[in-house]
Amino acid sequence: MAIDSTEVITVLISILCGSLLGIEREYHNKSAGFRTMILICLGSTLFTMVSQKMGGSGSDDRVAANIITGIGFIGAGVIFKNNFSVTGLTTASVIWISAAVGMMIGIKEYQIGMLITVFVLVILSLFVYVETIIDIINHKRLFTLVFHDTDISNLEMVEKMIVSKKLKSRRKQVSKRDARLIVTLEVYGNKKRIKRINEVLLSIREIIQF
């Protein structure tokens, strides 16, 4: 069977778009990096091309739906959750959009596929500065405080101190262990003011560890 030059071009464009997305993820040392993004984009393209060759009523839709399902499993593998935070959501989203780009290229919509790739790179590269500005204005940080006893008034004293610094706090977890009060506080507000709280916490005798 002769090789169709159009299909070769489709595969090369898919590799190019996957490479661009992968370079950005690899640069930021993410779990799904350069090779992974290429393979995801290329795999989606190939499955889309195969679905077109298979023919039959509704076959394209079925293959597309299965691609989306499969990508969902891969994306879930890069999402990690600990007690109070979730990481990997952006990488999972890039995996998802990489598959969408591959499918778009697979149906020969090269311009839209490459344009979406550029848009994604702009969002990932430039919008991080917007996030930085927002983070300075409304920064969040978790503090785990260990008090020398279980007196709740000590916690209330810390909360009042936080308010006096023009910050806000929220109790995330309160527990007692070995006759000591252990509290996890989420403090949010101006980033510089939150950094100064470390110095204040060091001076509070009732806190033995934070």
Image (cartoon, helix red, strand yellow):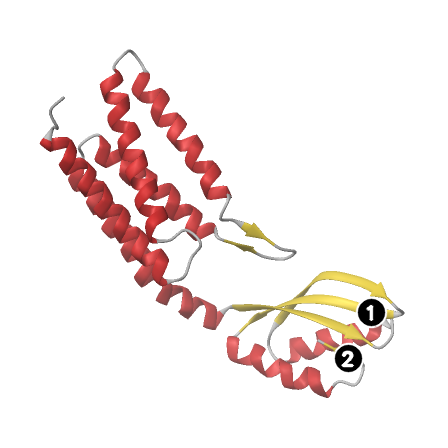
Q: Position of residue 127 (x, y in %)?
A: 34, 61
Q: Give me the residue at 44% from left, 67% from top.
A: 134
Quadrant of the drawing holding the C terminus: bottom right
Could you classify mark 2 by the number of other residues whose Cα lies within 10 Å: few (under 14), some (14-19), or many (20 or more)? many
State the residue in front, 67 or 122: 67
The answer to whether 13 appears left or right of 141 in the picture is left
Q: Amino acid at mark 2?
A: Ile
Q: Position of residue 50 (x, y in %)?
A: 26, 24
Q: Position of residue 12 (x, y in %)?
A: 18, 42
Q: Give me the residue at 50% from left, 42% from top.
A: 76
* Secondary structure at numbered mark 1: strand
Q: Position of residue 102 (x, y in %)?
A: 28, 38
Instruction: Write down the residue under mark 2.
Output: 207
| Residue, far right | 179
Q: Which mark is residue 181?
A: 1
| Residue, far top | 57
